[in-house]
Image (cartoon, rainbow, N blue to C red):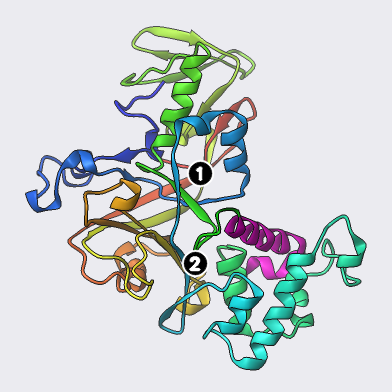
């Protein structure tokens, strides 16, 4: 059941008219942006790691047969005011302008260690127990400087802040291996893949598979109320006077606001452009990570860009997103470092939404809010 007239709830992809209605009310989009139906703008944009568990779930459940994916062109990192390609192999590390000649050798040794590491093979551990040694101590063992640690931790391991440095190193090594495995899976310019027509295709694909097995998907169902019995167990969902009985409910926080707790806020700029992000080798789809230290922040900032090559915009148009954990009540000022990297922006929408965590056992509530 969904209160909206489209699939995916807050994780949907909107056409241009729906986007305009959401952010500009009754105003109409200008004609020069092209046809509304050619747009599929993600409300919660995210590239998928090519070898991650989500991809394996899609394949295992046969949902993948309803989807078409395309590799993402590039993965970049922001360092000292410039954008650089993320070196993903020991060979690329030796060529990267991010490091000096001696630092490249140290980084190469570290990357080789990560590539060879096998949790079940003690010979690959080099005498270290990564469940005990802290990540910062592992970096110190290989003599990596602060600059290298910054892009390794945030652009390879994809940590969103620096708390990982004081946590066991095993998680970071696993994250780096996933990055390398995902990069090798399609042998493209990045470890990421992305569905044609946007992430809104994911819930639609699950709905199609559900229908094939007798499931029912109901759109435009207003005022959905989750029903509980006297001991607090979920027993059904009511809408328009009708109740569907069930034993479990999966929903976003807006359906059970009294069963979640707020844990943060996300600030995001949605931008429509007629060019790729500068300094990314004219990539039509790309992610640029801005580590927190580079911006003097507590958390990272992300640039996500896709285009007509992924069927999310008309020919010649690009959709860019700048996202970060909101740390103030001035999202436009917070997002400015990322927006400044985009070049000319034709239209921009600023969105801020709360993040929640569930506090109930018999309902499965996502961390995304309306």
Q: Specify the farthest residue to the front.
A: 187
Q: Which mark is residue 300?
A: 2
Tell me the element at label 2: loop
Disc with the residue nearer the chain's start (1 vs 2): 2
Q: Are the two marked residues, 1 and 2, in contact with CB atoms closer than 8 angstroms?
A: no
Prevalent SS, magenta region: helix
Using a 10 Å C-alpha cutoff, classify the residue at mark 2 as few (fewer than 14 neighbours), some (14 to 19) or many (20 or more). Answer: many
Residue 145 or 354: which is nearer the viewer?
Answer: 145
Whether residue 302 is visible, yes or no, is: no
What stretch of residues is rendered in magenta? 162-184
Whether residue 265 is visible, yes or no, is: yes
Picture coordinates of residue 194, whole percent (x, y)? 45, 48
Picture coordinates of residue 42, whole percent (x, y)? 35, 45
Q: Which mark is residue 151?
A: none
Where residue 78 sits, quadrant-wise, is bottom left
Where residue 106 sits, quadrant-wise, is bottom right
Using a 10 Å C-alpha cutoff, classify the residue at mark 1 as few (fewer than 14 neighbours), some (14 to 19) or many (20 or more). Answer: many
Picture coordinates of residue 149, whole percent (x, y)? 63, 78
Identify the residue shown where x is 32% and y is 68%: 277
* In this picture, residue 365 sits left or right of residue 319: right
Instruction: Locate the C terminus by quadrant.
Output: top left
Residue 143 or 276: which is nearer the viewer?
Answer: 276
Residue occupied by mark 1: 356
Is the residue 80 above or below the residue 341 in the image? below
Residue 282 lies in the magenta-colored region:
no
Q: Which one is closest to the eye, mark 1 or mark 2? A: 2
Picture coordinates of residue 222, whole percent (x, y)? 32, 20
Q: CA distance from mark 1 to mark 2?
A: 19 Å
Tell me the element at label 1: strand
Is the residue 25 above or below the residue 274 in the image? above
Is the residue 118 above or below the residue 148 in the image? above
């Amino acid at each position: 059941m969904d209160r909206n007239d489209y699939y995916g709830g807050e994780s949907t992809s909107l056409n241009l008219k729906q986007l305009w209605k959401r952010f500009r009310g009754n105003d109409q989009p200008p004609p020069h942006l092209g046809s509304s139906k050619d747009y599929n703008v993600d409300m919660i944009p995210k590239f998928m790691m090519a070898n991650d568990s989500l991809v394996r779930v899609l394949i295992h459940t046969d949902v993948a047969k309803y989807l078409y994916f395309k590799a993402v062109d590039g993965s970049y990192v922001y360092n000292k005011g410039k954008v650089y390609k993320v070196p993903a192999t020991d060979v690329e590390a030796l060529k990267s302008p991010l490091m000096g000649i001696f630092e490249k050798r140290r980084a190469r040794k570290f990357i080789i260690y990560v590539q060879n590491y096998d949790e079940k093979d003690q010979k690959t551990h080099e005498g270290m127990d990564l469940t005990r040694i802290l990540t910062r101590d592992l970096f110190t063992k290989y003599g990596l400087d602060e600059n290298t640690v910054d892009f390794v931790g945030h652009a390879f391991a994809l940590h969103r802040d620096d708390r990982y440095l004081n946590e066991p190193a095993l998680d970071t090594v696993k994250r780096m291996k996933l990055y390398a495995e995902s990069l090798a899976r399609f042998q493209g310019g990045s470890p990421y893949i992305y569905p044609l027509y946007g992430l809104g295709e994911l819930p639609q694909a699950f709905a199609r598979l559900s229908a094939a097995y007798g499931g029912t998907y109901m759109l435009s169902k207003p005022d959905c109320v989750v029903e509980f019995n006297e001991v607090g167990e979920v027993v059904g969902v009511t809408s328009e006077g009708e109740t569907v009985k069930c034993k479990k409910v999966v929903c976003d926080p807006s359906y059970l606001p009294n069963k979640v707790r707020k844990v943060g806020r996300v600030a995001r700029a949605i931008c429509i452009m007629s060019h790729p992000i500068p300094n990314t080798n004219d990539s039509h789809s790309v992610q640029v990570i801005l580590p927190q230290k580079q911006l003097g922040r507590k958390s990272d900032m992300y640039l996500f860009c896709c285009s007509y090559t992924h069927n999310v915009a008309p020919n010649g148009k690009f959709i860019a997103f700048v996202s970060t954990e909101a740390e103030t009540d001035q999202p436009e000022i917070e997002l400015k470092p990322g927006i400044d990297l985009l070049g000319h922006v034709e239209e921009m929408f600023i969105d801020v939404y709360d993040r929640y965590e569930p506090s109930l056992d018999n309902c499965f509530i996502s961390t995304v809010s309306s």
